[in-house]
Image (tube, helix red, strand yellow):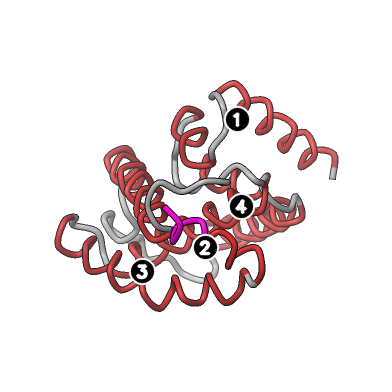
Amino acid sequence: MNGNHNELEAFRKNPNHVVSGIYQTCRPKFIGWGKDATRISVHDLADIFQNAVIIMVLNLESGRLSELIGTLCTYLFGIGKNLVQAFRRKQGRIGLPGDEAFPLTRETDAGIEDAMITAETDAQLWSKVDALGEPGRSLIILTYKEGLNSQEIAEVMGYSSPEVVRQLRKRCLDKIRKS
């Protein structure tokens, strides 16, 4: 247990060094596990790992993670496995890019203009999400990009209940609407 306490103390003293070490040691293990245990691409596994690291850092900085039973790498794997499950559920609900036939259009087709307007609107929306800061940004990403429900987000981010997540999400969406 003392080694786990030392990891938390090391993070408090130099978080960048600890996170860098986690990337060097845990990322290859996580991606190796994911390649063997799941049918998820290495690119998607890397994204999932990145999201897990962000959640872990948020939990450490906010004080929600104040005591470890295992190591930070073990804790990170737990978050990552929850995100993998959410990713798989999301895959079951919607098709992945490239699954559908990509329609060919000409430059004069109205569809291209609509797509450009939609892309610009999406970019503006996500810039507003980025402006929320943490943990609001992560909560919105986990909801709308990762497809997690309130219970799953509460577990991953360390909130006491799904109701807390719903209240925070509502506040974040209100801020986005007002900006």
Q: Which residue is mark 4?
A: 58
Cα–Cα gap, marks 3 and 2: 17 Å
**Residue 3 among those drawn in magenta:** yes
Q: What residue do we see at 36% from left, 44% from top?
A: 82
Q: Which residue is mark 3?
A: 26
Amino acid under label 1?
Answer: Val
Q: Which residue is mark 2?
A: 6
Compared across the picture, whether 107 is left or right of 129 comes to left
Q: Say what secondary structure mark 2 lies in.
A: helix
User: Can you tell which of label 3 and label 2 is closer to the viewer?
Assistant: 2
Amino acid under label 2?
Answer: Asn
Horizontal and vertical percent position of residue 6: 52, 63
Q: Which residue is mark 1?
A: 165
User: Can you tell which of label 2 and label 1 is closer to the viewer?
Assistant: 2
**Residue 40 among those drawn in magenta:** no
Horizontal and vertical percent position of residue 8: 55, 59
Q: Is residue 23 above or below residue 49?
A: below
Q: Say what secondary structure mark 1 lies in.
A: helix
Q: Say what secondary structure mark 4 lies in.
A: helix
In which image quadrant can residue 31 be found?
bottom left
Magenta residues, start to end: 1-6
Q: Earlier in the sequence, mark 3 or mark 2?
A: 2
Q: Earlier in the sequence, mark 3 or mark 4?
A: 3
